[in-house]
């Protein structure tokens, strides 16, 4: 029998381990110039994008952003499906609606925030019982924040179609304006900075959704699956800049700059911008660290759709059908700390 010294065995084993580690290293994609059409609502929750733009996170990756502001989620979903935008930042439930209702193969490729959602009412509404016979203002009646609000009212014994009606108005800014336009527009779900605008006009909050409903995955980046597969490098570069923008927002040394950016981008007062900033960094209410997907919040969103819309016969599906986080995970590994 030929004996082989153990020190010789270490050479190929060490070599293979080193090669394996090298193979596992994540390299950034090529920095080819690219223009990305990104569709968003006009909201403080865009702050990771705004900060990434302001501090050059997109520019250093040769990405030119073409920001599109949507009036409502219906137009946003239709635009993404038709190829008029490449990436949409929208409630996770809108991605589910695209897959299940519109039959468009859409995937969630990252996280974002819990929506900073609060249930607001007109000044004369003292309790949810006073909503009877009036309208809830919503974006689209069968998706996202409307489902959260409908669930909260259901828990209070109020049923849509029996005790109140839905008034599809559009995005949050439009819903705030609707409160002032008619006393019939009694209740709606809002988020910053529009919560503070509503307060200044006399409306008041009945509580944050996280307390009235529970964890909820709101804004996420979504794309068509085929587009992601064909543009994986550009998508990963975008997500790395987005992650960096999220980190910039949380960095206490950037507080003054974040507030200044909110003021500039959304035409806000110092007070409203400052209060919006505090909400954005509030755990469980604002942004998620590194803009990661909140899986518990997403499962809650799926449960909500199953209950309120009867989707899937009321049986909640596994979330994997709607998410593809490999692009985010690769981007995360080479995003700047």
Image (cartoon, rainbow, N blue to C red):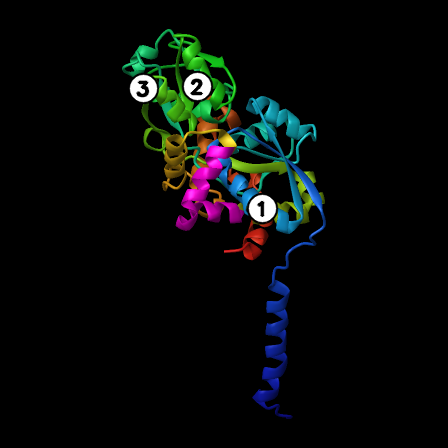
Circle on res. 176: 2
Residue at point 56%, 24% (across, down): 73
Q: SS class of the residue under badge 2? A: helix
Mark 3 or mark 1, which is nearer to you? 1
Circle on res. 156: 3
Which numbered disc flags the more N-terminal residue, 2 or 3?
Answer: 3
Q: Is residue 199 above or below residue 44?
A: above
In the image, 205: left or right of 12? left
Q: State which region is magenta.
A: 243-264
The residues tagged by marks 3 and 1 sit, at their Cα atoms, a distance apart of 40 Å
Residue 59 visible in the current orientation: yes
Quadrant assignment, res 320 = top right
Q: Is residue 106 above or below residue 178?
A: below
Quadrant assignment, res 103 = top right
Q: Position of residue 247 (x, y in %)?
A: 47, 49
Q: Position of residue 328 (x, y in %)?
A: 57, 48
Which numbered disc flags the more N-terminal residue, 1 or 2?
Answer: 2
Which numbered disc flags the more N-terminal residue, 3 or 1?
Answer: 3
Q: SS class of the residue under badge 1? A: helix
Residue at point 48%, 22% (across, down): 173
């Amino acid at each position: 029998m030929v004996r082989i010294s153990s020190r010789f065995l270490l050479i190929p084993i060490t070599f293979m381990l080193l090669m394996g580690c090298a193979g596992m290293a994540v390299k950034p994609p090529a920095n080819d110039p690219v223009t990305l059409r990104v569709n968003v609502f006009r909201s403080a929750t865009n702050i990771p994008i705004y900060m990434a733009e302001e501090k050059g996170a997109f520019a250093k990756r040769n990405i030119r952003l073409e920001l599109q502001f949507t009036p409502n989620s219906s137009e946003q979903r239709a635009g993404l499906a038709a190829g008029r935008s490449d990436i949409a930042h929208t409630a996770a439930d809108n991605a589910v609606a695209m897959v299940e209702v519109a039959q468009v193969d859409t995937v969630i490729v990252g996280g974002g925030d819990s929506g900073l959602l609060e249930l607001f009412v007109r000044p004369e509404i003292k309790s949810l019982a006073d909503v009877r016979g009036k309208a809830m203002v919503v974006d689209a009646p069968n998706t996202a924040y409307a489902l959260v609000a409908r669930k909260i009212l259901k828990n209070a014994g109020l049923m849509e179609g029996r005790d109140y009606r839905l008034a599809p108005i559009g995005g949050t800014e439009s819903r705030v304006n609707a409160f002032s336009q008619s006393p019939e527009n009694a209740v709606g779900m809002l988020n910053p900075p529009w919560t503070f605008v509503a307060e200044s006009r006399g409306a008041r909050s009945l509580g944050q959704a996280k307390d009235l409903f529970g964890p909820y995955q709101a804004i996420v980046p979504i794309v068509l699956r085929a587009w992601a597969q064909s543009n994986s490098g550009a998508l990963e570069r975008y997500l790395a800049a987005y992650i960096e923008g999220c980190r910039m927002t949380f960095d206490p040394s950037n507080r003054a700059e974040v507030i200044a950016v909110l003021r500039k981008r959304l035409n806000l007062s110092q007070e409203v911008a400052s209060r919006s900033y505090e909400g954005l960094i509030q755990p469980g209410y604002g942004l998620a660290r590194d803009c990661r997907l909140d899986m518990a919040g997403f499962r809650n969103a799926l449960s909500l759709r199953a209950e309120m819309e009867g989707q899937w016969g009321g049986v909640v599906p596994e979330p994997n059908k709607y998410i593809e986080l490999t692009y985010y995970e690769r981007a995360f590994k080479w995003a700047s700390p």
